Image (cartoon, rainbow, N blue to C red):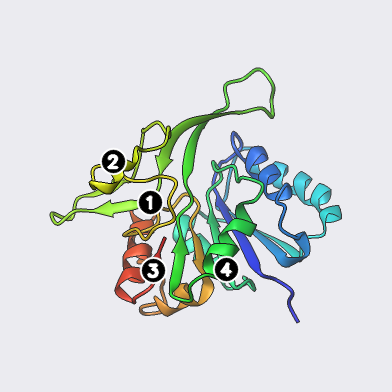
């Protein structure tokens, strides 16, 4: 019987520049590793991505993850079709859809699970994503900024979609502006229209609930806007996104 609480799924194509940082942040999670499953799918990379993952696989065996699976494609499936392939072997109650250029906070998994457990209707969680810089002199160093990349998607009546907070300095909103509806409170747990595709966390049953013709996302959306398709489906099927 599986002990998995949460599955980390990473789909990557030519991620040599970022993947060491991403993998290290997985290894450094404070959530018990024996309750975490890690699945990686490589979309036929032709740089050093596969070599780096293979080296990391040997190192990480001693960290006691519930399981580790590495799939090497002979073609590029695209992002979400790749994640749907990994979902077939995902045993966790919750699933992290991870992009290679994301570095997870060490408490990421524990915090995500704690939010899900507050409300059975929550189908997806949007983390607050910051921009960071890899241009330092040390090979494994990075500089985290206070500039927000996204807090999820907001939709307007015109159907225009924006990334909440993109490019804004997370200095903390004033109570007056937030209460007047003039500013999004970046430090408040709240419902949003939709999660964005960099590192959303899903309840697995919510994803399975959204299948149409056995696809969670339209596979014609190879790389761009497929995250919005998934999130919109969640909305239509009645799942909360926070």
Residue 29 visible to an observer of this rendering: yes
Please say if the residues under marks 2 and 4 sit with CB atoms less than 8 Å apart. no
Disc 1 is placed on an element classified as: loop
On-image quarter of the N terminus: bottom right
On-image quarter of the C terminus: bottom left
Which label lies toward us, 2 or 3? 2
Residue ID at (24%, 48%): 181
Residue ID for mark 1: 152
Of residues 177 and 44, the one nearer the viewer is: 177
Where, by quadrant of the figure, is residue 167 drawn?
Answer: top left
Residue ID for mark 2: 176
Question: Rounded to the nearest whole Å, what is the CA distance between mark 3 and mark 1?
Answer: 13 Å
Q: Callout 2 environment at 10 Å: few (<14), some (14 to 19), or many (20+)?
A: few
Q: Is residue 119 above or below residue 12?
A: below
Q: Is residue 164 above or below residue 209?
A: above
**Lower position in the chain sequence, tag 4 or tag 1:** 4
Taking the view exactly as shown, the residue that stands out farthest to the left is 158
Residue ID for mark 4: 94
Q: Callout 1 environment at 10 Å: few (<14), some (14 to 19), or many (20+)?
A: many
Question: Rounded to the nearest whole Å, what is the CA distance between mark 2 and mark 3?
Answer: 27 Å
Disc 3 is placed on an element classified as: strand
Disc 4 is placed on an element classified as: strand
Residue 99 place in picture, x, y as percent: 53, 49
**Lower position in the chain sequence, tag 2 or tag 4:** 4
Of residues 106 and 210, the one nearer the viewer is: 106
Residue ID for mark 3: 240
**Lower position in the chain sequence, tag 3 or tag 4:** 4
Where, by quadrant of the figure, is residue 102 drawn?
Answer: top right
């Amino acid at each position: 019987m599986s002990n998995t609480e949460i599955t980390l799924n990473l789909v990557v194509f030519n991620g040599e520049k970022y993947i060491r940082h991403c993998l290290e942040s997985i290894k450094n999670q404070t959530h018990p590793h024996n309750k975490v499953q890690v699945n990686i799918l490589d979309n036929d990379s032709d740089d050093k991505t596969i070599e780096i993952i293979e080296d990391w696989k040997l190192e990480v065996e001693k960290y006691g993850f519930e399981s580790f699976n590495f799939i090497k494609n002979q073609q590029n499936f695209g992002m979400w079709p790749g994640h749907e392939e990994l979902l077939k072997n995902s045993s966790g109650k919750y699933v992290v859809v991870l992009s290679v250029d994301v570095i997870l906070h060490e408490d990421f998994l524990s915090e995500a699970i704690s939010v899900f457990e507050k409300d059975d209707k929550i189908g997806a969680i949007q983390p607050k994503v910051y921009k960071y810089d890899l241009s330092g002199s040390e090979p494994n160093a990075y500089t985290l900024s206070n500039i927000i990349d996204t807090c999820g998607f907001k939709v307007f009546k015109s159907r225009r979609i924006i990334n909440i907070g993109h490019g804004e300095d997370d200095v903390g909103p004033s109570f007056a502006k937030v209460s007047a509806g003039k500013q999004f409170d970046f430090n408040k747990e709240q419902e949003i229209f939709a999660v964005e595709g960099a590192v959303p966390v899903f309840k697995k049953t919510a994803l399975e609930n959204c299948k149409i013709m056995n696809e969670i996302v339209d596979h014609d959306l190879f790389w761009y806007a497929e995250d919005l398709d998934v999130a919109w489906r969640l909305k239509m099927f009645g799942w909360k996104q926070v």
